[in-house]
Amino acid sequence: MATELDFSPPEIPEPTFMENVLRYGLFFGAIFQLICVLAIILPVSKSHKADSESFEPKNSETVKKPKATAPQISKKPKKETKKKR
């Protein structure tokens, strides 16, 4: 048992630029997903709901807009053919 044991930490190479981008991108994505889930779960304040209702039209007459007719490009004049006897 005269041999010496090597208890030094293993040599780990430094992470590359793309590995760092991937790591921090995954962290950012996870935090963004948590924020989105919390936005769905937590209720919205009533003042925000009142503001959003004021932007909605009161009746259907103000919503109706005249529809513009698109030019009919696909219609081609029919080619006249002679009757074969």
Image (cartoon, helix red, strand yellow):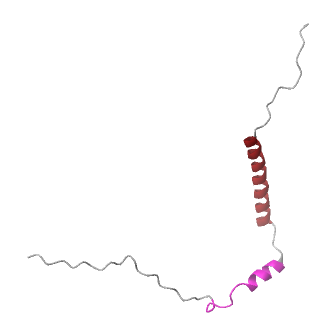
Instruction: Report x, y in % for residue 63.
Output: 62, 88
Q: In which quadrant will I find the N terminus? A: top right
Q: Residue at x 47, y 85 (%)?
A: 69
The answer to whether residue 82 is left or right of residue 54 is left
Instruction: Report x, y in % for residue 77.
Output: 30, 80
- Location of residue 26 with respect to 76 vertically, above or below: above
- Location of residue 35 with respect to 79 vertically, above or below: above
Q: Is residue 51 magenta?
A: yes
Label count reads: 0
The answer to whether residue 2 is left or right of residue 33 is right
Q: Residue at x 79, y 31 (%)?
A: 13
Q: Residue at x 81, y 70 (%)?
A: 43
Q: Residue furthest left?
A: 85
Please give the range of residues in magenta: 46-62
- Location of residue 16 with respect to 58 vertically, above or below: above
Instruction: Report x, y in % for residue 78.
Output: 27, 79
Q: Residue furthest top?
A: 2
Q: Residue at x 83, y 75 (%)?
A: 45
In this view, the residue in front, 54 or 83, is 83
Q: Is residue 79 magenta?
A: no
